[in-house]
Amino acid sequence: MTLRPSIVEQLARARADLRLGVPVVLTSEDRAAVVVAAETLDAARLAQLRVMGGELALAITARRAETLKARAYDGDLARIVVPPDVGLHWLQAVADPADDLATPMKGPLRAQRDGAADLHRAALTLAKSAQLLPAAVVLPVEDGPALASENGLTLIPLALAETELFRASPLHPVASARLPMQAASAGRVHIFRPEDGGEEHYAIEIGKPDRSKPVLVRLHSACFTGDVLGSLKCDCGPQLRAALAQMGQEGAGILLYLNQEGRGIGLANKMRAYSLQDQGFDTVEANHRLGFEDDERDFRLGAGILREMGVSRIRLMTNNPRKVRMMEANGVAVTERVPLKVGLTPENAAYLATKAAKSGHLL
Ligand SMILES: Nc1nc2c(ncn2[C@@H]2O[C@H](COP(=O)(O)OP(=O)(O)OP(=O)(O)O)[C@@H](O)[C@H]2O)c(=O)[nH]1
Ligand SMILES: [Zn+2]
């Protein structure tokens, strides 16, 4: 027994640190680096990094590099050299596409080619999972563990962390209660909590679904703007209500409310994407310009909750074939895809057409 935090707990701290703007130390084999999320770095810490010496790099994803016409020598990412005379504003302009159109030239940007990119890759993975912009300032240091202990910084040895970074954290039920709803008087809300300190997710169980038969299921990704505000830009709110209504009519079903706002990029980044959409980019282009993939959701957690609830065969309410594939790949058999076509508005017609054309959604 030890009081020392496990690597999973250290990773949760690292995410919180990055959100606060606190540096984190990453180590791999004989290398070490101090990393800070570009979005939360402040001038004082940037100055301190400069005093420490060494070549500062800004890690960005290949998606962001493509927009900036920078070379992604590492395949999925680019290590942009930070010139000695630039300030915070430059770093944030490379990280954040908000002003790309107003001030197109950030460069020419020079990318590092030699050396390993594993610390940079881990920094980007951490920034994404902290729902920050995927951009991190990385400074190589000599003795990572010493720097971490002298400054009280979180230390992440990649050899221990790598499998954890990409593992779906197990989810456990924490509480549940009866909830009569407009759509169904026999409702029950179950809260599931992951072991890695991440978001909680909810299962809304209607009636008592018979587990020996395929259960009517909807995997709903949180959409604050659509679910709560009645946004006309997407179809989430009407889909949420239609799914609950059909479960109410059939007398049984499970709606998973997954807190993967903005297809997994978080509400702040989704609002950044909406701003880009107001500049003329579609939903997929906007995600790419920010440095994200079209869809950053992890559907393993939906499959995990269903398994935890004793459900292994489902009738899945969706127009998204990827969801069907992800359920099947994670041990949940989809016996039927139930289309969910509601909520078409003049404002979301182009959005739905883009999803059909670029993301394979069925119209
Ligand atoms: N990044 C981003 N996320 C969006 C945008 N519009 C809606 N979302 C999010 O997308 C998620 C809903 O995903 P959809 O693509 O509408 O639908 P789906 O879940 O893939 O497929 P269905 O099961 O057919 O509804 C929610 O998390 C929304 O917050 C957008 O323009 N950009
Ligand atoms: Zn929505």
Image (cartoon, rainbow, N blue to C red):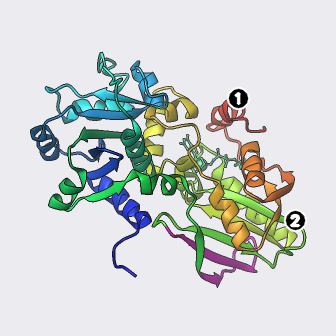
The type of residue carrying mark 1 is: Ala
Q: Residue at x 28, y 51 (%)?
A: 25
- Vertical side of 30 occupied by 24: above or below: below
Say few, some or many: other residues with alpha carbon within 10 Å of mark 2 (under 14 / 14 to 19 / 20 or more): some
- Residue 214's label in the rendered image is 2
Q: Position of residue 250 (x, y in %)?
A: 87, 69
Placement of the N terminus among the 4 image quadrants: bottom left
Q: Residue at x 20, y 36 (%)?
A: 88
Determine if residue 74 is in view.
Answer: yes
Determine if residue 342 is in view.
Answer: no
Q: Position of residue 351 (x, y in %)?
A: 63, 35
- Vertical side of 15 occupied by 178: above or below: below
Residues 214 and 273: in front is 214
Where are the magenta residues, as a range?
175-195
Where disc 2 sits, the SS reads: loop
Q: Which residue is mark 1?
A: 357
The type of residue carrying mark 2 is: Pro
Q: Quadrant of residue 161?
A: bottom left
Residues 127 and 237: in front is 127
